[in-house]
Image: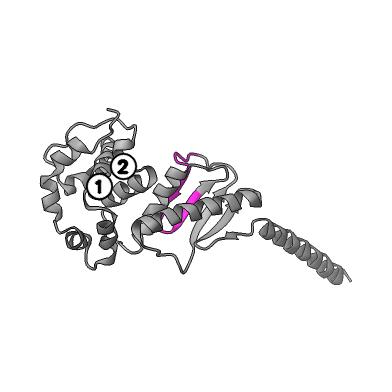
């Protein structure tokens, strides 16, 4: 008799837990758009907020697709984690991994969203892209030509090389400068060569330096010789 009652009790508890779990799963059900799967964490995020985030993501993706001519996620989804409250200790309200974006539920910074999403779009068709290309292009797509920005100008980059620029991204003291110089170079490339050459980089084959040379007709070493002129011209006009 005790055994039978125990089984009934355990069965009832199991059913209750299953229903609670199902209710939680239903509350956290993802919103899916053409390119994104959006999941809520840390509490129930209203569906209208998830849908708004989905619309913003698709708008940002469309801007990048138009700019670069690549649609690497036309099959498969980019995962998006939306937190009801910002995660403790997070310095940024958005961050991008290989194919994953973290946002808080009230996120509405479209420039930063385009920036972070650009990294994801670049990575799949161009995995050999160096950091300067990633960050320079993300800055340009997110915020436009550096000449229209309100950043402070940086001092001349003595003995410039792309190797030294790459190294500056890994050091906290020089990382902000590295973003600036990469953004200047990308502003020059788009202004002088146009968007079609940039699109061609993604269509070529080989390592990044080879793709770059095929698309632009000049090598990275040639670009290094022009660095002083680029940094003198492509800087914030407000300075």
**In the image, residue 91 lies in the stretch drawn in magenta:** yes
Residue visible at 46% across and 69% down in the picture: 75
Specify the label residue 145 is tagged with.
Answer: 2
Q: Is residue 230 above or below residue 128?
A: above
* Coloring basis for residues: one colour
* Image position, residue 53 (x, y; %): 55, 50
Quadrant position of the C terminus in the picture: top left
The residues tagged by marks 1 and 2 sit, at their Cα atoms, a distance apart of 9 Å
Specify the label residue 141 is tagged with.
Answer: none
- 218 vs 96, left or right, is left
**Closer-to-camera residue (228/171):** 228
**Closer-to-camera residue (38/229):** 229
Callout 1–callout 2 Cβ contact below 8 Å: yes
**Closer-to-camera residue (41/71):** 71
**Label 1's element?**
helix
Label 1: which residue?
Answer: 191
* Image position, residue 126 (x, y; %): 30, 62
Q: In the rendered structure, which segment of residues is drawn in magenta?
A: 89-102
Quadrant position of the N terminus in the picture: bottom right
């Amino acid at each position: 008799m005790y055994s039978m009652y125990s089984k009934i009790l355990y069965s009832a508890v199991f059913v209750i837990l299953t229903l609670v779990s199902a209710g939680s799963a239903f509350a956290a059900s993802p919103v899916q758009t053409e390119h994104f799967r959006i999941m809520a964490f840390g509490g129930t995020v209203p569906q209208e907020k998830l849908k708004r985030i989905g619309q913003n993501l698709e708008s940002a993706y469309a801007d990048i697709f138009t700019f670069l001519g690549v649609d690497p996620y036309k099959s498969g989804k980019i995962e998006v984690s939306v937190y009801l409250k910002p995660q403790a200790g997070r310095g940024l309200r958005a961050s991008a991994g290989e194919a994953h974006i973290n946002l808080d539920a009230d996120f509405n910074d479209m420039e930063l969203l385009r920036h972070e999403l650009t990294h994801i779009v670049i990575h799949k068709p161009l995995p050999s892209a160096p950091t300067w290309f990633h960050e320079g292009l993300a800055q340009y797509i997110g915020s436009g030509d550096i000449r229209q920005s309100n950043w402070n100008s940086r001092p001349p980059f003595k003995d410039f090389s792309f190797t030294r620029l790459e190294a500056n991204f890994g050091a906290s003291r020089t990382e902000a400068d590295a973003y600036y110089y990469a953004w200047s170079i990308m502003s020059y490339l788009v202004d002088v060569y146009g968007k079609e050459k940039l699109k061609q980089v993604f269509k070529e084959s080989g390592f990044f330096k080879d793709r770059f040379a095929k698309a632009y007709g000049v090598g990275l070493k040639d670009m290094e010789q022009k660095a002083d002129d680029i940094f003198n011209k492509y800087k914030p006009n407000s300075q």
